[in-house]
Amino acid sequence: MVLPLRPVSLLLAGCLTAAALPLAARAAAPQAPAAAKTPAVVAVDPAYMDLSTDPCGDYYRFANGGYDSTPIPGAYAGYGVNQEIDERGYALLKTLLDAAALAKASPGSATQRIGDFYASGMDLARLEQAGLEPISELLSAIATLKDGSQLHAVVAKLHAAGVHAGWSVYVATDDKDSTSVIVNLSQGGLGLPERDYYVRSDAASAKLRDQYAKHVAAMLQLAGEPTATALQQGQRVLALETKLALASKTLTQLRDPQANYHKMDRSQLAALSPQLALPTWLQLVGVPQTQQAVVVGQPDYLKALGKLASSEPVAHWQTYLRWQVLRAYAPYLSAALDQENFAFYGKVLAGKTEQLPRWKRVLRALDGGIGFDLGRLYVEQAFSAAAKAKVNEMIDFHKEALRQAIARAGWMGEATKVQARRKVDTMVAMVGYPDVWRDYSALTIRRDSYAGNVLASNRFDFARDLAKLGKPVDRKEWHMTPQTNNAYYDPTMNQIVLPAGILQPPFFDLAADDASNYGALASTIGHEILHALDDQGSQYDADGNLKNWWTPQDRQAYDAKTAKVVAQYQSYEGVPGLKLNGKQTLGENLADIGGVKIAWEAWKLAAKSRSADATQTLGGRPLTADQRFFVAFAQSWRTNERQESLRLKVQSDVHSPVRWRVHGPAAALVIYSEAFGCKAGQAMFAEPTRRFDLW
């Protein structure tokens, strides 16, 4: 899909997971262990705990050790609390899909779009019969490429179709002018997760690159190339993408918003990379001539790409572009292409052994294409007005807790505090679902072509984004569907967005006590609010502009304190022999630690207006309300994950693996040490050298 604004890793800096997924259905899930079958879904479940473990020695095992033996179903890279929430949600969504597919709905209605999109994806016989026909228009455009000077024209067709070949394009609020919308160009076009996969010299990385080249060859062979030719072409793609990777910035470098912002007018854009004819490309993709400025994230990348457009043989570019189209559309085409795509991206990269059931995969595609149609039906049954009111109340307490934390921050001067408080005061929270639903009436969805529906929805989204240019910024727009089990913070809007899909038990339950709800949602409400003041979010002012509002002394003090967090996480080993990158994950780690701290204080503020949460005996062990807060937080991350998936995350994700998202905050917060009586020298004791004292 064409992303609505900027890439998720950049725009949605507060996403809880690397990839936002729609909900899934429990009824169709693989067999779960006895511990996962408790009648009530609660934030603190003793069946998941290992009460023989000292919480000061291994916090994650104490809270989740009883879950460690849970098998990971073959279709998952990891399985845990998020997947359990997903499974329950999908049960509801599937009933909506099945009903829509059977309904004789009027053309152009939401029910017709949902039913026909779903039915098209489930019609396997028609998929096989269609072959590559749904993407033939894109493949034909590539075949017309005569030399590198025409590359921009072909790439324009692919970009409009949701294929991020060569470079990425997105329409977004201007980072330095939050009242306007602008076109952004950035590095992209790689088939491996990120640039370092192409340059690492260890044996495992070399093997993976060989597997990747063979996968590209297999896909091209399925698309009609002879075996020997396809094998050569797989190597060509790897070689060309390696050159693109060498010109790309690292994940850590991409986390500096100032260094990745370069506003240019059309003449400057033309001079930047003459071979790419970028002003003509703008015209071809549909950017109005009145839009004179664009933002280029990585100018050196486009310069290098322009040189490659001239130096690389046209046949190499044609192969690369065909591969990028196949990679983007394989899940929606024949079984052979779909399975080969999964063989590399699912099995090799993530360690999965089987695909999700077909209907779940189709639902994910539908969610990406017309998800707000489905979301409107979902929230009617899954999220009440009372739940929304309670979450908004919790958010208010979190904001007050952060105001108080800013007030007592001895390292921050008053001038900076004024701006920080203003940022908290003006922060907007959007909860559950949008006030105005997305209008898909101009999008035609048909029952006879699954890939055709994906292509149509990609083009619809691309055109929809371009239509924002020259208009006021829509500050109520959502970039996740309501059924999504995730959340985000948007720095250009100074806005947190919490879909109904994540506000489900055990993360949130109207019937639960506050210790459970505030603890379990520390990884959501607290986390997203704290992104406003993480190392990236803190560079945006209260109005959403990338603008320094810190005194030099206060910024220096901030950087010194966050350097302790970098050092803390770099000491953690994500998988044997591979430590975390503390700079790459800094923003998420700051939101994790600070989120727990502020959620704790928000809970204490809430307790002043109601009865205090009492001690409860769970599994034969008394747990104070303070302790249950922390167990609820830890159990909100309970997950078992494959080694392949963990390695992938450590090397390509800005989030730490889940065990360190639990251990990290505990080891840095005095409130955890006090709750469990941890002493100096114990793993979870907040030693002065790593003690979190930012907020």
Image (cartoon, grey):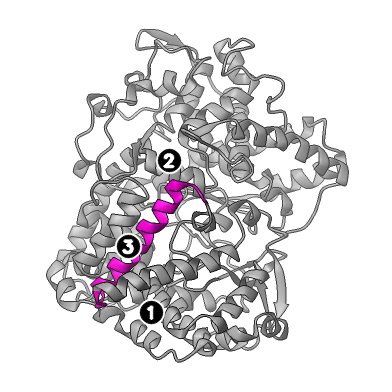
Give the residue pinned by disc 2.
646
Was residue 218 drawn as part of the magenta stretch in this picture? yes
Q: Amino acid at mark 2?
A: Leu
Label 2 or label 1, whichever comes before in sequence order: 1
At 60% from the left and 72% from the top, the residue drawn is 185
Instruction: Count how many numbered circles sit on residues in the image.
Output: 3
Is residue 130 in view from this perspective? Answer: yes
Q: Nearer the viewer, residue 217 or 526?
A: 217
Q: Amino acid at mark 1?
A: Ala
Marks 1 and 3 close (CB-CB < 8 Å)? no
Nearer the viewer's eye, disc 1 or disc 3? 3
189, above or below 605, in the image:
below
Q: CA distance from mark 2 to mark 1?
A: 42 Å
57, above or below 330, in the image:
above
The disc at residue 442 is: 1
Q: Quadrant of residue 141?
A: bottom left
Give the residue pinned by disc 3.
215
Q: Amino acid at mark 3?
A: His
Query: Which percent across, then down, holds residue 118?
Result: 23, 65
Q: Nearer the viewer, residue 336 or 658?
A: 336
Q: Quadrant of residue 368?
A: bottom left
